Amino acid sequence: MKNIISDQRCAKCGIMTKKFNFVILFVTLTTLSFVFSGCLISLVPLPPSPPPVNISGKWSGVYAFSTNNQIVNFTLNLTQSGTSLTGTFNIITPQYIQYPITGKVNGSDINFIASVSKNEYFSFTGSVYGSNWGMSGQFSCYYNGVQTFSGAWSAEK
């Protein structure tokens, strides 16, 4: 293997000089930079991951029909275990009605079903925002597998 620095005698004056082999120097420095950058990257701690979303608790909200903008008030009583979601969906106006909920939480995304009857249910999809204090999204109601109405919803703790 060649040295990075070698002695060389000047042909005109006969003085000994040092000659750099720049190719070997470049390859050596490049290799060292990759080795040390890998070491430095592994020494830098990663930022902590955000805490998992937990939407357990009582939520108050509204949903609005897309066809006529009628607004309905509701509450949610949610229990989250891991990514599973259970609880109740309670329509407050025009009359109080309570339906069981099952659903999933995936990161800040949520989806749940409020079962009205064997053939009828509400399907909610949305996202949690603001350190778990709000959520919003879209909903649809289905009867015998056919969508009967839809709209937007939002809720806060």
Image (cartoon, grey):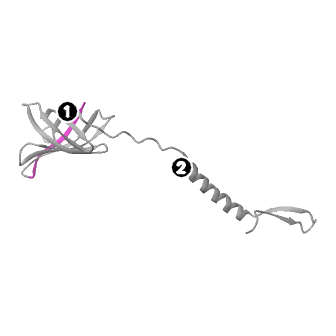
Q: In which quarter of the image is the N terminus?
A: bottom right
Which-is-in-front pick, marks 1 and 2? 2
**Residue at left offset 64%, top offset 57%:** 32
Does 68 sit left or right of 58 as displayed? Answer: left
State which region is magenta: 145-157
Q: Was residue 143 drawn as part of the magenta stretch in this picture?
A: no
Magenta stretch prevailing secondary structure: strand
Q: Is residue 147 magenta?
A: yes
In percent of width and height, residue 74 lies at: 15, 33
Inspect the image, locate mark 2, and give the three-letter code of the amino acid beneath it: Ser
Q: In which quarter of the image is residue 26?
A: bottom right
The residue identified by callout 2 is 42
CB under 8 Å between callouts 1 and 2? no
The percent position of residue 121, horizontal first and vertical second, equals 10, 45
Q: Where is residue 126 in the image (x, y as percent from the top left)?
A: 25, 43
Crowding near the residue tagged with mark 1, few <14, some 14–19, many ≥20 C-alpha atoms within 10 Å: some
Q: Is mark 2 on a helix, strand or loop?
A: helix
Side of 147 where 34 appears, left or right: right
Residue at the extreme front of the image, as rendered: 81
In percent of the image, x 22 and y 36: which residue is there? 154
- Viewer-side residue, 107 vs 86: 86
Residue located beneath label 1 in the image: 61
Q: Dot 2 surroundings within 10 Å: few (below 14), some, or many (20 or more)?
A: few
Q: What residue type is labelled 1?
A: Gly
